[in-house]
Image (cartoon, coloured by chain):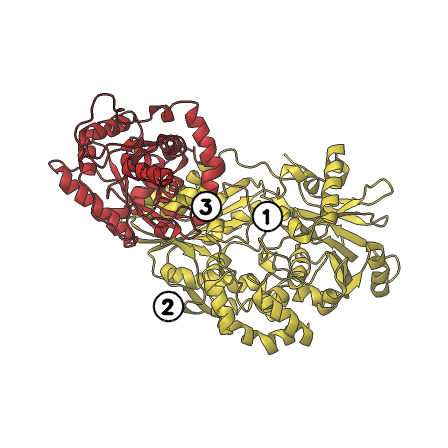
Chain colours: A red, B yellow
């Protein structure tokens, strides 16, 4: 008789996704299987919000600055946004979310939720709770149930939260940008929210796919002029337009159609209360 | 309403006098009968600076309102003074930020798309991103940096144009973007009378070719002093150059003045006259003195350079440069002028930690000479506070320490040029050209954060008038080798320095102490 307890445990560990979301290819769950994870609404209530603010200001933002010294361009587009927006960025690393949150003005950051892949971040409940607390994420399915997920995302937008959304659906392995999924356009169409194109560059060297801890390295974030659906424009065409804007930002363009003219940026950054910035 | 400047005669009841000592302070007893010159108290700042700026822009002096000069499709350049003004750097918001925001608001309303902002740093070092942001404010910075907000590069062959020769044969060059603009708006901050006027454009956006005609020993010896523009050959040359520039490009000038409040309330004892010190001021002095005595130089430097001045804007005027500058000088003189009767045998000055050329850097020995003998000595109108052949006593540690990023050419100037000669004329004749055209210094000026290769020469020329005028210069507390390299004498204590001075000016000399900063301008009759 051979002692196989360890290998059996290994077989069980590898064979099932404990506590994770059911893959789409599996048959309907039998009664008794837990429901899809909640959208973590507790993470957007007090005192969790205040606690997150402390973590961000005291720890995450200084750490991000020390490690990557992000060069941020176009922040004025978000400074005085008068309605919630979808922040659409390319995605090259796990470090992206923290860096993009760093790039946002304080007011926008504190009102931003992050769409996090449900089948990755919420496989383990404790991990889902940690990222929910730390980054204000909510589970976003990549494998099915799009209607429900879009519903919770649109509810969040309608209740005044900006949504940070990686429209490629996954991280790029080499820093190159993939195609945007049409869900972005659907969401913008459904909520009539403006979409702010953002491009992050350099973070794939900070935390490449497969790496657990970040490395120091320079990162640049460019934020473009917010885009809104044109009358009669369908969701796919709008998604393509956002993707084009993000690509243009990555190419270093100064095209006023993408980054806005200085007058537009100046007016966008006008303090709401006269003299408030002084 | 603050008190005017004062001349106090030291008697046995006079408290000890504060002397700045680089990154440190001292209290010294001056001989009975000495005079102490105090600057006027800070003037009350404008209650609503934004409103005052809007008013100045809509009712300029001898010019059309700025709004009427702006139109869509035009090329607009806004130039502004660099971080050499004011000292110490101003707590935010800097007055330039307030002015820039109003000017840019008008440009946005008028639909002027082509706008560039240029820091008029002349041959000074480039400003870092943070320094630019501090001056222009966050909103202007994020809107324009880096493509449309940048430092002037006096060594960019493509970025400068030759404008012509003045009637006196002075060459004039100008930043290309400014020269090719339909309108240049210059935003100035005048701290002392030598700033502003035609000098802003002619020097700030000029190059070595256009600065050389007035930053030379002959001109500076002919400026008695350069703090008094009407008596300054330097300013006369700048006016000629500025007039030529105005024939080339339309310039709308905006000048601002600030009051005399360089020290934050935490060190209010530096601002106050000694007889006004409260026990709290005495305690603060004691704490600061102990800190300065015990802390390593780098720690002291960080603490001093972190200081931000709570200056308040006292006036703003815009329009045609000469009319504007006349008003500016009135406002500056109102804040600085102190009437003094007769000259003195010995003048004492506490040299502080900061001069216009070492913001966020150590003050090297060449800059100590520039600050003490160039700036502080020249704060006079009419005739110098000290008589010809008199003695200047400076207090400063005068260490052999240089900032290798900001002042690379200063190191070589100290080691090579001053080892050869300290005579400004010979220095200019033998060495200037080589440093000015050195390709490595040029590279560091353009791409790093270094002062131009020729800059240490100008710092030295700044002191030329004092060196010629004075019989002796004594540095109290200075590093002996460094002080001797400058051609001065070294003393351990102020009392020793007075003893040494007596050998030059005779027994029982008259002594005057310039209690600055805050700065004062002595009107000597």
Mark 3 lies on a secondary structure that is helix
Residue with the mark numbered 3? A65
Residue at the spot x=33%, y=36% of the render?
Answer: A121
Q: From this viewpoint, is residue B40 visible?
A: yes
Residue B12 falls in which quadrant of the image? top right
Q: Real-space Cα distance between discs 2 and 1?
A: 34 Å
Question: How far separated are the C-alphas under marks 3 and 2?
Answer: 36 Å
- The spot of residue B57 in percent (x, y) is 41, 43
- As displayed, is residue B199 above or below residue A226? below
Compute the Cα span from label 3 to label 1: 27 Å
Identity of the residue furthest to the right in this view: B507
Q: Is residue A118 left or right of residue A275?
A: left
Q: Residue at (66%, 67%) from the top-left corner?
A: B464
What chain letter is assigned to the residue under label 2?
A: B
State the image coordinates of residue A71 (x, y, percent, origin top left).
40, 49
Q: Position of residue B334 (x, y in %)?
A: 61, 44
Farthest-out residue, front: A1
Q: Chain of mark 3?
A: A
Q: Which residue is mark 2?
A: B158
Give x and y (percent) for residue A210: 35, 48
Q: In the image, which is nearer the foreground, mark 3 or mark 1? A: 3
Quadrant in which the N terminus of chain A is drawn: top left
Secondary structure beneath dot 1 equals loop
């Amino acid at each position: 008789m051979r002692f196989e307890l360890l290998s059996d445990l290994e077989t069980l560990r590898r064979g099932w996704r404990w506590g994770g979301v059911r893959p789409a290819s599996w048959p309907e769950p039998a009664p008794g299987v837990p429901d899809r994870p909640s959208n973590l609404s507790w993470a957007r209530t007090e005192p969790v919000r205040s606690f997150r603010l402390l973590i961000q200001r005291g720890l995450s933002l200084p750490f991000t600055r020390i490690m990557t010294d992000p060069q941020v361009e176009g922040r004025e587009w978000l400074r005085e946004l008068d309605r919630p927006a979808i922040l659409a960025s390319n995605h090259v690393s796990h470090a992206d979310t923290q860096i993009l949150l760093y790039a946002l003005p304080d007011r926008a950051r504190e009102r931003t939720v992050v769409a996090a892949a449900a089948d990755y971040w919420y496989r383990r409940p404790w991990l889902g709770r940690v990222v929910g607390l730390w980054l204000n994420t909510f589970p976003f399915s990549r494998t099915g149930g799009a209607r429900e997920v879009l519903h919770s995302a649109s509810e969040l937008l309608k209740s005044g939260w900006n949504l940070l959304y990686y429209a490629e659906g996954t991280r790029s392995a080499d820093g190159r940008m993939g195609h945007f999924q049409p869900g972005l356009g659907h969401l913008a169409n459904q909520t009539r929210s403006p979409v702010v194109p953002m491009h992050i560059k350099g973070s794939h060297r900070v935390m490449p796919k497969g790496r657990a801890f970040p490395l120091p390295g320079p990162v640049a974030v460019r934020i473009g002029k917010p885009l809104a659906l044109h009358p009669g424009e369908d969701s796919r065409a709008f998604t393509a337009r956002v993707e084009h804007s993000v690509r243009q930002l990555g190419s270093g363009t100064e095209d006023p159609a993408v980054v806005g003219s200085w007058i537009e940026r100046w007016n966008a950054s006008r303090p709401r209360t006269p003299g408030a910035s002084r | 309403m603050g008190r005017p400047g004062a001349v106090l005669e030291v008697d046995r009841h006079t408290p000890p006098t504060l002397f700045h000592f680089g990154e440190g302070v001292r209290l010294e007893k001056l001989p009975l009968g000495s005079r102490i010159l105090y600057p006027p108290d800070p003037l009350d700042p404008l209650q609503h600076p934004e409103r005052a700026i809007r008013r100045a822009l809509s009712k300029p002096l001898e010019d059309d309102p700025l709004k009427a000069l702006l139109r869509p499709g035009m090329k607009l350049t806004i130039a502004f003074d660099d971080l050499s003004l004011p000292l110490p750097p101003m707590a935010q918001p800097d007055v330039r930020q307030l002015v820039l925001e109003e000017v840019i608001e008008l440009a946005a309303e008028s639909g002027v798309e082509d706008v560039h902002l240029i820091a008029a740093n002349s041959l000074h070092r480039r400003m870092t991103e943070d320094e630019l942001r501090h001056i222009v404010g966050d909103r202007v910075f994020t809107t324009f940096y880096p493509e449309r907000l940048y430092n002037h590069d006096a060594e960019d062959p493509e970025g400068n144009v030759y404008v012509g020769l003045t009637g006196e044969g002075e060459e004039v060059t100008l930043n290309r973007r400014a020269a090719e603009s339909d309108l240049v708006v210059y935003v100035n901050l005048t701290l002392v009378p030598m700033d502003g006027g035609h000098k802003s454009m002619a020097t700030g956006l000029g190059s070595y070719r256009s600065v050389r005609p007035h930053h030379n020993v002959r001109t500076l010896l002919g400026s008695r002093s350069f703090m008094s523009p009407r008596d300054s050959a330097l300013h006369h040359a700048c006016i000629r150059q500025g007039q030529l520039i105005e024939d080339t490009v339309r310039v709308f000038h905006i000048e601002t003045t600030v009051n005399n409040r360089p020290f934050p309330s935490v060190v209010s004892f530096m601002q106050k006259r000694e007889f006004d010190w409260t026990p709290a001021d005495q305690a603060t002095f004691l704490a600061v003195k102990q800190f300065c005595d015990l802390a390593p130089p780098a720690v002291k430097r960080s603490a001093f350079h972190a200081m931000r001045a709570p200056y308040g804007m006292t006036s703003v005027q815009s329009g045609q440069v000469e009319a504007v500058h006349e008003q500016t000088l009135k406002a500056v003189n109102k804040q600085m002028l102190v009437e003094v009767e007769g000259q003195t045998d010995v003048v004492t000055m506490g040299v502080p930690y900061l001069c216009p050329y070492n913001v966020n850097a150590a003050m090297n020995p060449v800059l100590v000479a520039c600050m003490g003998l160039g700036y502080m000595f020249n704060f006079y109108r009419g005739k110098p506070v000290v008589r010809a052949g008199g003695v200047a006593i400076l207090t400063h540690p005068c260490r052999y320490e240089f900032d290798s990023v900001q002042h690379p050419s200063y190191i070589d100037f100290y080691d090579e040029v001053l080892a050869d000669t300290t005579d400004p004329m010979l220095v200019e004749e033998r060495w200037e050209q080589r440093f000015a055209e050195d390709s490595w210094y040029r590279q560091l000026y353009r791409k790093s954060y270094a002062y131009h290769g020729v800059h240490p020469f100008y710092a030295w020329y700044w002191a030329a008038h004092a060196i010629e005028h004075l019989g002796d210069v004594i540095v109290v507390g200075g590093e002996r080798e460094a002080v001797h390299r400058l051609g001065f004498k070294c003393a351990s204590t102020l009392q020793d320095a007075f003893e040494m001075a007596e050998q030059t000016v005779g027994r029982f000399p008259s002594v005057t102490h310039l209690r600055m900063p805050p700065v004062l301008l002595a009107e000597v009759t």
